[in-house]
Image: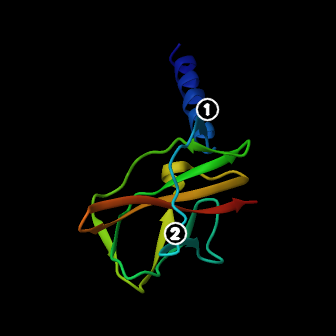
Amino acid sequence: MKKILLSILLLIFLSIGITGCKTSYIRKIDTTKITNSKEITLSIKEGTLTNTDTTIIIINNSNKKFYYGEEYSIQIKKDNKWHIINAISDFKVPKYTIIPGETKEIELKWENRYGKLNKGTYRITKNFEYEDSKGKHPFYIATEFNIE
């Protein structure tokens, strides 16, 4: 009896492990409004993209100081719409600054959060904000990429 129970439990854990290696997306469509800004840009560093990680490049082309955190999200394009991918949230709270004219490279390792990305079209979205006399102005920028 113990052997049968242990065998069943082992099969359950193996099934969870196998399905956990795939990227699963929620059918919910992502409604994040993306700002197409020339003031601050987000791109993938050439030669760094894999199905588990990449390096992004953030360039501040403005005379403003922008703030951002470690958080980012990845969506998958299906039926010409962006869909939310299930993820485990593991971000730290600190906020960073990117000053006018500055370029930053940030390595993103998403395998623990999203799993290995399957073949498809994806985008990374990242939240930024700037502050002026009228208050804080949050917005999102994005960059698209393909996993072959």
Q: Position of residue 24 (x, y in %)?
A: 61, 40
Residue wearing tag 1: 15
Q: Position of residue 57 (x, y in %)?
A: 52, 75
Q: Earlier in the sequence, mark 1 or mark 2?
A: 1
Name the image quarter holding residue 53: bottom right
Amino acid tagged 2:
Ser
Q: Is residue 62 left or right of residue 131?
A: right
Residue wearing tag 2: 37
Name the image quarter holding residue 88: top left
Q: CA distance from mark 1 to mark 2?
A: 44 Å
Q: Position of residue 70 (x, y in %)?
A: 38, 62
Task: Bin the neighbour count of mark 2 within 10 Å (Cα to Cα): few under 14, some 14-19, many 20 and up.
Answer: some
Q: Position of residue 102 (x, y in %)?
A: 41, 85
* 48 over 20 or under it: above or below: below
Which residue occupies the extreme front position in the image? 134
Q: Residue at x 64, y 55 (%)?
A: 122
* 69 over 113 or under it: above or below: below
Secondary structure state at the residue bearing disc 2 = loop
Secondary structure state at the residue bearing disc 1 = helix
The residue lying toward the viewer, choosing from 30 and 4, is 30
Which residue occupies the extreme bottom position in the image? 101
Disc 1, disc 2: CB below 8 Å?
A: no
Q: Residue at x 54, y 55 (%)?
A: 111
